[in-house]
Amino acid sequence: MSLDFSLQPHHDGSALYIPNQKPKLLEQVKVRVRVHPKFEAKIGKLAKVIVRQSENGEAFLQAPAKLIKSNDGWLWFEGTITMYNPSIFYRWCFVTENDDVFWLNTLGFSDLEQPDINDFRINVWSSGPSWGPGTIMYQIFPDRFARSKHADKHKLPEWAVPKAWGEEVTGTGYPTSEQFFGGDLWGIIEHLDHLKKLGVTMLYLTPFFPAGSNHRYDASSFSKVDPLLGGDKALVALVEAAHKMGFKVIGDLTSNHSGDKHEWFQAAFKKPGAKESDFYYFTDKNTKYESWWGVPSLPKFNWKSQELRKRFIQGKTSVVAKWLKAPYNLDGWRIDVANMTGRIRDEDMSKEVARIVRETMHEINPNTILLGEYTGDPGFEIQGDGWQGAMTYANFTKPLWRWMANPQNKGFITYMGIGARHLNGMQFVETHKRFIASFPWHVRQHNMNALDTHDIPRFKTFTRKGAQRVGAGLQFTFPGIPVVWAGDEFGLDGFNGENSRTPLPWNNERPHDTSMIETYAQLAAIRKSNPALVDGSMRFLYASKEAIVFIRESKKQSVLVAATRGKDDEIKFDAESIYGADRAVNLFGGGKLKVGKKMIHLPGEKMSINIWSLPAAK
């Protein structure tokens, strides 16, 4: 069984369909949809194509769209949306000469009336930096990346259990959070050449503040860099060296909580009269308090406090601002536990906090990026007015794991959680579409597409042989920011998030496989040199149990991608659905297209990824 999407009507929020990517309030915005004559013949000759727009709580059909061109094999219709509100929901309505009505929304084409929640979205909040969609992220957990010559000079804190660089990483039980391998920021500087070879353009550092653990999400201060990592001097040197080599650098902030050793918490604990008392949710004369998931070492911030806002997130003297300014000059923040920030019982200040953080960052440097962590579905909340993109697993990571999971390794259920199941390629496409449905295009472009991170097991450990190469190919060709978690390029394993925080084997300290280094380098080069992979639209063409095919299209070029899990000898779709297949150039994978008069056939070898460059449609 397979699904052929190739001739279905299509629209998304990319520039090919919405030329104005940054509309303003009350502005009229042109929107386009494509319909193939062969598909029109199936449903009946079209009498009208209309945009249905929701504004001020009511839905209206706009004036019929105009046929603007048909010279690339498709009929292109153009309608108009008016930005009466900062955020507008819309869908396409197709009316045939027989008065049959069909709809096109984010989930696809249907003859049934659709709920508004699945409409396309456009808003005025596109504020992400222009470099965001084209960046290639590399995530670094400082304690495990590299030890410099300075590392042995750092005095160990009481909490640390020292470990040799080649020792096994403890994944559960003591001393999971206390094991200390001694990586520092100076060590990162020493290996920037490796990252340059890999094709990386942005470094994402997990927290670098002093704390009571190796992960440092329990910060004891936000005013300085942990001396164990080299202190402020090392961060300044790292960012300066990274910028000279063309890298952006972003940090990691915990907006939901601090550590119980934090100077603000210590100033108020058991001291009801302290100015910092309202920074947290204290009770019983400041002896009891709310914390993240009930973990005592992670007391939860109370964002009703105006003083907390002033010190932490609002204005030029805040924590958020400090590290974006000289001499540190970070290029943005990833916000930890963004989904839970500002939320407790009947209080919800999450979006308000996000907006304040974004406004502060733009005041200091509008060319910075703000990404919020959402372990669940972030689509209905991240719209760009606060967080500009999401570190999420729902729309890419989890569906890909479920498609590529090794059926012999039952451990992936632990990461996937209740209801976990294996998916085929058709279900992968359907799941992905459902979880990207609520994002406006500019947010989708800034979402992180990760195979794995420091919080989950290694992708390679729980998937089929060869899946990492295919998964990486999809990372670099889907809309969004591809994320390489440090160590993936060395073929390292990890049975859970803690165990995946593996010290990198720079001097062969542990078994590893460097074959993915060249793969990442090739994919990064392809992404950088093919603009359609940065801002091009995305249209699925084919899906079966074992394969998916899609095309990214822009005004400059098109890029065709085919990925397989198992062998599929029937990958084919209508030759009129794409333009220029006879001039396709293979960029990755070595496969050849067979272009016939009626159908295009693609290679379907087991566990493969092929990428072709095509000319832009006329």
Image: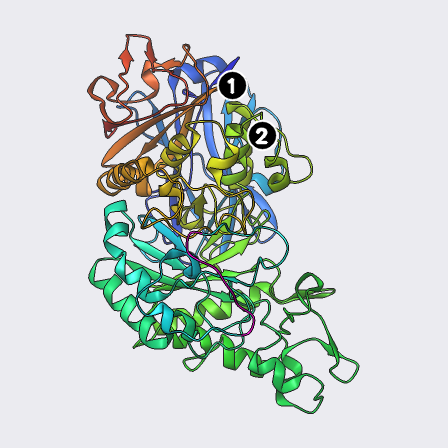
* Residue at x-position 32% and y-position 72%: 234
Examine the structure image and report whether residue 161 is included in the region drawn in magenta.
yes
Position of residue 34 relative to residue 321, above or below, is above
Q: Position of residue 255 (x, y in %)?
A: 55, 68
At label 1, the amino acid type is Lys
User: Residue 407: which quarter of the image?
Assistant: top right
Residue ranking furthest to the bottom: 273
**Residue type marked 2:** Asn
Callouts 1 and 2 close, C-beta under 8 Å = no
Judged by its main secondary structure, the magenta piece is loop
Image quadrant of residue 524?
top left
Task: Answer yes or no: is residue 105 visible.
Answer: no
In the rendered picture of this protein, how many numbered marks are placed on residues? 2
Report the residue marked by disc 2. Answer: 409
Residue positioned most to the right: 284
Q: Position of residue 324 (x, y in %)?
A: 36, 72
The span from disc 1 to disc 2 (Cα, nearest Å) is 20 Å
**Circle 1 SS class:** loop
Q: Residue at x 35, y 66 (%)?
A: 185
Q: Nearer the viewer, mark 1 or mark 2?
A: 2
Residue at horizontal 71 percent and vertical 70 percent from the top? 290
Helix, strand or loop for disc 2: loop
Residue at image mark 1: 545
Relative to 363, say whether 496 is above or below: above
Magenta-colored stretch includes residue 118: no
The mark nearer the N terminus, 1 or 2, is 2
Range shown magenta: 158-166
Badge 2: residue crowd in 10 Å (few <14, some 14–19, many ≥20): few
Q: Residues within 10 Å of mark 1 (few under 14, many from 20)?
A: many
378 relative to 235, above or below: above
Q: Give above or below for 555 relative to 502.
A: above
